């Protein structure tokens, strides 16, 4: 099963490679990895998606926690309700006959055209992975020249108390 | 900082880091009495505001920090990028340095020192090849959870990444085989990094920490502050086990009929040997140890059923396989112990005590995980049992059918070997050695058959009396580890039990031992084979002895002679006792070589990937 983990790590050089090395060294899957600074400049926030059975996920979380640089690990998927987002930039072929269609599609999916050239549109799409996949599928027949994706970032929703 | 300086009124830190007298006021004027006067205090304090800015060079910080950590001896090998630290060590002169002959030897010696004494071992190497040579030693310590701090020199910060002479990314290389590591890029970080390195190395599940110090940092200057305590927000090992888990564990004992205590190296590290014994005697449960757990429970105790695993006793493996409750104490269900995991102790519920949560539920499913220090956990468990449990006799009565079964296994296939009047059996050498030393000795081993025969036929009654590379299985470990152990305990008998293959892997350290005048005794079981691999080839590869037959081996007696040590040799069984006796009685370093039966095997043996009940017997 797919799990999204939120990891707070000390903002030290090498922290990223410790985590990447842990996954490769122990043969765990890593599907995507996003790193960015937090409000506290001494900490970085990593979101990573991985997959495996319960024992493997438990082992991944324990192994992450064992790293001296790791401050906190949260299995967002286990925590209950959460939101996750990914962004993609897609450079699609935009010939005279398809330009209008692309724009219509952008409208439906609430994408943005962020760059235009005589033969291409560059589309920015944000959303859960499923939405991005859908946009890519629709643009494929028209012709995709290039894709850049951010990987998933996620956050637990605030727990409501009764 | 201020507090520390107030102890030395009238003194200030100089550039060299020493406190010397100075006088804005005259010294007479400035004793403790006048210091106590309030009006003087203010002036005094302002005066110190200036003096705490006094700076210290990185190399002096290094020495000062080591002294604060209580380091008495370090093992190392110099080079261009570490020359400044060496110079500072010598200028200071309080820390003993042992010059090895290869950096791998330094790492193993620091490891042996740490395992024998329980203190943090320290080793020192230069950049590049010096650093990479320590890697095997670091990985060895990592696998067996040995507290160790390795300092390496590095090229100056401005050259890092330029493929400079003797530059290597040692922090990158050792990332997966250290508990943590640091590259110090700012002199201001150095004291804190050293403090953290020692703290991380010895706390929680211990392990090696590497600190890489560039040459310019060794000479850069900054203020030196060294905290007594350190707290790292992202590293807080759990030591106190949860009492709820302990109570649940006790409930399982209440309902079990066939328990076993499975004791590993964690019991040695946490100093839980007395608690292990207390618990075993309290509930009358059999105890089996792993290779790393030898000595955590007396080898001569009637409730000790022997070592577990690939070359464990028939009795221990059968007991484990048929148990209905396993209490694992600081053990990690290694593949050499479990054999085929699917067939491992199918009827057993498992309680697992370990300070490292990742060890729990890694290889087998555990019913009651207990995260915490083994000793603390056992103390709590013993208390719960004595408060609520049955009296000792009831436990004994309850498990008596289980003990009958265990005795039957023990009787069916006791540990043994076929004696031979014409050729020396290695087991006989170990037995005789044990008879002569009776637990006085610290034994180190190399890896392979020599290690397994030692584990089987030498009885270890106290913890930290066997030093062996269990996890990584590093040939060449024994001799340098013996050097470390002998440095920690100059008055104890230290014996390295070696094979003719593995002794040659770090044989250069004989020079180190001789230079330090260490009276280490080395037993070489010479079968002119890489015996353990040969044994596998015999059993599983139709006796095709590929690359395991040493058609040439050196004359070890002459080697001893070349190093100005004593060399003795036995080629017939009736010489064994004399050689051992003479060897142990001779002062100084002695090599005792035994020409053993060439194709002797280690049995019982669980073939790799088989269930532990499928043992090959003698």
Image (cartoon, rainbow, N blue to C red):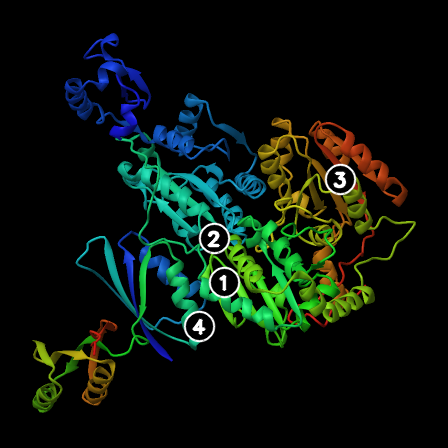
Which of marks 2 and 1 precedes in the sequence? 2
**Is the Cβ of the residue at disc 1 closer than 8 Å to that at disc 2?**
yes
- Tell which subunit mark 2 falls on: B
Instruction: In the rendered view, tell whether residue A143 sits above or below residue B338.
Output: below
* Cα distance in 3D space between marks 2 and 3: 32 Å
Residue nearer the viewer, B269 or B571: B269
Q: Residue at x 64, y 68 (%)?
A: B259
Q: Residue at x 55, y 60 (%)?
A: B387
* Cα distance in 3D space between marks 4 and 1: 13 Å
* Cα distance in 3D space between marks 1 and 2: 10 Å
**Residue under pointer 3:** B437
Q: Is residue A59 visible?
A: yes
Q: Residues within 10 Å of mark 1 (few under 14, many from 20)?
A: many
Instruction: In the rendered view, tell whether residue B144 sits above or below residue A52.
Output: above
**Residue under pointer 2:** B205
Q: Secondary structure at mark 1?
A: helix
Q: Both on one chain, marks 1 and 2?
A: yes
């Amino acid at each position: 099963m797919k799990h999204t983990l939120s990891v707070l790590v000390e903002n030290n050089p090498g922290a990223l490679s410790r985590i990447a090395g842990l996954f490769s060294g122990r043969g765990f899957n890593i599907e995507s990895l996003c790193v960015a600074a937090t409000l506290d400049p001494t900490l970085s926030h990593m979101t990573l998606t991985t997959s495996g059975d319960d024992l493997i996920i438990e082992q991944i979380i324990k192994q992450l926690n064992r790293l001296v640089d790791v401050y906190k690990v949260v299995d967002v998927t286990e925590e209950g309700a959460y939101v996750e987002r990914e962004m993609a930039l897609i450079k699609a072929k935009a010939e005279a006959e398809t330009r209008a269609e692309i724009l219509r599609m952008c409208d439906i999916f609430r994408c943005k055209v962020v760059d235009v050239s005589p033969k291409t549109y560059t589309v920015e799409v944000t959303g859960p992975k499923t939405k991005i996949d859908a946009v890519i599928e629709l643009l494929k027949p028209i012709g995709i020249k290039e894709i850049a994706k951010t990987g998933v970032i996620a956050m637990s929703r605030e727990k409501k108390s009764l | 900082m201020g507090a520390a300086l107030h102890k030395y009124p009238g003194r200030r830190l100089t550039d060299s880091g020493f406190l010397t007298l100075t006088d804005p006021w005259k010294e007479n004027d400035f004793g403790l009495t006048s210091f106590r006067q309030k009006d003087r205090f203010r002036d005094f304090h302002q005066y110190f505001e200036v003096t705490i800015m006094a700076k210290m060079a990185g190399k002096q910080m290094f020495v000062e920090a080591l002294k604060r950590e209580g380091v008495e001896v370090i093992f190392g090998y110099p080079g261009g990028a570490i020359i400044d630290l060496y110079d500072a060590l010598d200028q200071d002169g309080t820390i003993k340095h042992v010059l090895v002959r290869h950096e791998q030897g330094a790492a193993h010696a620091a490891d042996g020192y740490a395992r024998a004494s329980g203190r943090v071992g320290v080793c020192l190497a230069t950049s590049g090849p010096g650093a990479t040579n320590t890697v095997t030693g670091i990985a060895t310590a990592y696998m067996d959870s040995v507290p160790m701090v390795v300092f390496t020199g590095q090229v100056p910060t401005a050259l890092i990444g330029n493929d400079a002479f003797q530059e290597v990314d040692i922090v990158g290389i050792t990332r997966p085989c250290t508990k943590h590591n640091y590259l110090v890029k700012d002199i201001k970080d150095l004291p804190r990094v050293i403090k953290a390195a020692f703290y991380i190395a010895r706390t929680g599940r211990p392990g090696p920490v590497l600190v890489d110090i560039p040459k310019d940092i060794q000479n850069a200057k900054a203020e030196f502050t060294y905290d007594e305590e350190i707290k790292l927000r992202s590293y807080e090992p759990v030591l106190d086990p949860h009492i709820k888990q302990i109570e649940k564990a006790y409930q399982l004992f209440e309902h079990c009929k066939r328990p076993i205590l499975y004791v590993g190296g964690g019991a040695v590290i946490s100093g839980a040997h007395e608690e292990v014994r207390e618990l075993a005697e309290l509930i009358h449960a059999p105890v089996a140890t792993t290779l790393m757990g030898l000595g955590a429970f007396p080898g001569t105790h009637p409730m000790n059923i022997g070592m577990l695993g690939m070359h464990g006793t028939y009795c221990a493996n059968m007991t484990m396989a048929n148990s209905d409750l396993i209490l694992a104490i600081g053990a990690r269900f290694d593949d050499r112990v479990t054999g085929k995991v699917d067939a491992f102790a199918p009827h057993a519920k498992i309680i697992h005590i370990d300070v490292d949560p990742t060890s729990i539920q890694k290889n087998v499913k555990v019913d009651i995980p207990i995260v915490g220090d083994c000793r603390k956990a056992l103390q709590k468990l013993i208390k719960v049992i004595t408060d609520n449990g049955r009296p000792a006799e009831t436990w004994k009565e309850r498990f008596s059918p289980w003990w009958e079964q265990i005795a039957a296994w023990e009787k069916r296939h006791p540990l043994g070997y076929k004696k031979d009047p014409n050729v020396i059996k290695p087991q006989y050498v170990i037995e005789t050695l044990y008879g002569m030393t009776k637990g006085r000795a610290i034994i180190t081993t190399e890896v392979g058959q020599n290690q397994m025969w030692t584990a089987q036929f030498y009885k270890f009654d106290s913890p930290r009396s066997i030093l062996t590379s269990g996890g990584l299985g590093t040939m060449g470990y024994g001799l340098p580890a013996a050097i470390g152990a002998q440095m920690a305990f100059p008055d104890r008998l230290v014996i390295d039990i070696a094979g003719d293959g593995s002794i040659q892997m770090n044989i250069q350290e004989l020079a180190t031992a001789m230079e330090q005048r260490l009276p280490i005794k080395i037993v070489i079981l010479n079968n002119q084979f890489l015996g353990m691999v040969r044994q596998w080839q015999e059993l599983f590869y139709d006796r095709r002895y590929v690359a395991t037959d040493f058609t040439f081996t050196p004359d070890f007696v002459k080697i001893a002679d070349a190093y100005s040590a004593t060399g003795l040799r036995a080629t017939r069984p009736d010489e064994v006792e004399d050689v051992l006796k003479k060897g142990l009685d001779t002062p100084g370093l002695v090599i005792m070589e035994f020409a053993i039966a060439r194709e002797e095997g280690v049995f019982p043996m669980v073939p790799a990937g088989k269930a532990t009940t499928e043992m090959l017997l003698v």
